[in-house]
Amino acid sequence: MRYFLAILLIFGITYFVTRSYLRPYNNQAQSVPPAVVAVPPREAININSVYSPDGKMKVELQAKNVVDKPTVYSIFTETGDGQDKKLLYATNSADGNFSLSDNSWSPDDAYVFLLHKYDGIVDGLVLKANSADNDPRQFVVSKEGISNITG
């Protein structure tokens, strides 16, 4: 009977010591990790640029996307080495989407051509490359050719 009580006492002590030792780990396993909430970026700026054929000039199209607001497009020119940056034109996406093509420059670096998409219609804007006081010339590009719709 002594051996039985001794064995029972050893198992009892082992049980309570082990239980109290493992209690912090059991509580951690039952806790719920905090929720991770992804916050979308409030503002993103996409930049696309094309160099002139001779590499002396660069046109840059910046599309600034802000949550719950129209995209703002800004068109800049600058010299090939990044100097003398000029704003040519700015508008928002309510006027359509703008993009540059690989042949955005005129051969003499005097004009810049942009593609403009609005309500399924693709047209183009031609801007003077050296003037911040631009009144863009708008052209409709269609299967029949190009027609000037502004003076």
Image (tube, helix red, strand yellow):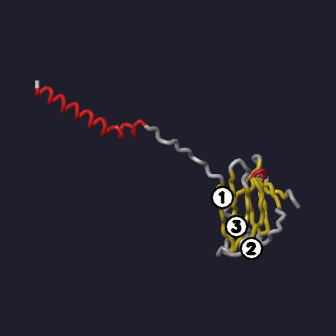
SS of the residue under disc 2? loop
Q: Mark 3 points at which residue?
A: 59
Most foreground residue, 79 or 8? 8
Q: Residues within 10 Å of mark 1 (few under 14, many from 20)?
A: few
Residue 83 located left or right of residue 6: right
Disc 1 residue type (three-letter): Ile
Q: Which of 41 and 88 is in front in this view?
A: 41
Nearest to N terminus: mark 2 or mark 3: 3
Pointer 2 local density, CA inside 10 Å: few below 14, some 14–19, many at least 20: few
SS for callout 1: strand
Of tags 2 and 3, the one toward the viewer is: 3
Q: Which of 140 and 78 is in front in this view?
A: 78
Whether residue 150 is situated above or below residue 14 in the rendered picture: below
Q: Which of pointers 1 and 3 lies earlier in the amino acid sequence?
A: 1
Residue with the mark numbered 1:
45
Specify the amino acid type for callout 3.
Val
Along the polypeptide, which appears first: circle 1 or circle 2? 1
Label 3: element kind: strand
The image quarter in which residue 108 lies: bottom right
Relative to 1, is 143 above or below?
A: below
The Cα–Cα distance between marks 1 and 2, rounded to whole angstroms, is: 30 Å
Q: Which of marks 1 and 2 is in front?
A: 1
Cα–Cα span, label 2 and label 3: 14 Å
Q: Residue furthest right?
A: 151
Horizontal and vertical percent position of residue 107 = 73, 71
Q: What residue does disc 2 label?
A: 108
Say the numbered circle drawn on residue 19.
none
Residue at the location (67% across, 71% down)? 53
Please provide percent x and percent y for residue 111: 77, 68
